[in-house]
Image (cartoon, rainbow, N blue to C red):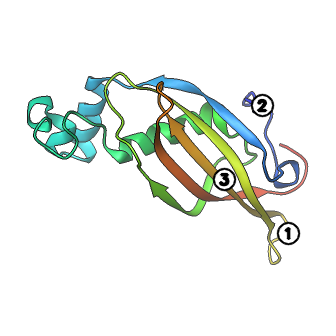
């Protein structure tokens, strides 16, 4: 697995199926979970630990959208060194386990498909599966994303 510096940006032509990347880590705490939820997903299992005990999650859990936002930041900063940035063209998102206060998350990504564009020769689509994993090795999110990646020399 590679962790590329932000200056080592890869074009579509630099990618290959099976290529892997690993991000740095992020520790999520109760304050982050509650702040995100208060603004974007104000449900009691994200905002109140006492109420959360009697819910599906049996305790405070981060919003899946919060986990997705952390995944994006980790991929942008240290995970997927793509030329032109991480530009989504669709995807599939799953949350097999909740993200909890105190979890230390990192992202492991793998290139699973590369398709150069026929109509726009300056770019193509890379399908990347990113798994967000906590310190116990539990996968808390799986993102299968179609990303628009420029062709040509790395920039």
Q: Point out the image quarter for the C terminus.
A: top right
Q: Determine contact: label 3, label 1, CB under 8 Å.
A: no
- Which corner quadrant of the image does residue 77 belong to? top right
Q: Position of residue 1 (x, y in %)?
A: 75, 33
Q: Determine contact: label 2, label 3, CB under 8 Å.
A: no
Give me the disc on residue 97: none
Q: Earlier in the sequence, mark 1 or mark 2?
A: 2
| Side of 45 where 135 appears, left or right | right
SS at mark 3?
strand
SS at mark 1?
loop
Q: Which residue is mark 1?
A: 121
- Which numbered mark, 2 or 3, is in the foreground of this view? 3
Q: Which residue is mark 3?
A: 128
| Side of 138 where 130 appears, left or right | right
- Looking at the image, residue 71 lies above or below residue 144: above
Q: Alpha-carbon distance for marks 1 and 2?
A: 24 Å
Badge 1, how many Cα within 10 Å: few under 14, some, many 20+?
few
SS at mark 2?
loop
Residue visible at 74% across and 27% down in the picture? 5
- Which numbered mark, 3 or 1, is in the foreground of this view? 3
Residue visible at 79% across and 56% down in the picture? 150
Badge 3, how many Cα within 10 Å: few under 14, some, many 20+?
many
Give me the disc on residue 7: 2
Residue visible at 19% across and 45% down in the picture? 42
- Looking at the image, residue 32 lies above or below residue 95: above
Q: Determine contact: label 1, label 2, CB under 8 Å.
A: no
- Which corner quadrant of the image does residue 102 belong to? top left
- Residue that protrudes farthest toward the right in the picture: 153
- Which corner quadrant of the image does residue 123 belong to? bottom right
- Looking at the image, residue 108 lies above or below residue 26: below
Q: Alpha-carbon distance for marks 3 and 1?
A: 20 Å
Badge 2, how many Cα within 10 Å: few under 14, some, many 20+?
few
């Amino acid at each position: 697995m590679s962790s590329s510096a932000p200056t080592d940006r890869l074009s579509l032509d630099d990618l290959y199926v099976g290529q892997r990347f690993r991000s740095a880590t992020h520790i999520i705490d109760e304050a982050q979970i509650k702040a995100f939820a208060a603004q974007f997903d104000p449900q009691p299992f994200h905002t109140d630990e006492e109420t959360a005990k009697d819910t599906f999650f049996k305790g405070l859990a981060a919003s899946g959208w919060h986990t997705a936002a952390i995944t994006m930041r980790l991929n942008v900063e240290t995970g997927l060194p793509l030329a032109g940035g991480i530009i989504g063209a669709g995807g599939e998102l799953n949350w097999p386990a909740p993200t909890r206060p105190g979890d230390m998350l990192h992202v492991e990504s793998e290139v699973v498909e590369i398709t150069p564009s026929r109509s726009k020769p300056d770019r193509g689509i890379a399908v990347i599966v990113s798994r967000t994993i906590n310190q116990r090795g539990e996968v808390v999110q799986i993102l299968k994303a179609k990303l628009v990646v420029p062709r040509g020399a790395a920039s």
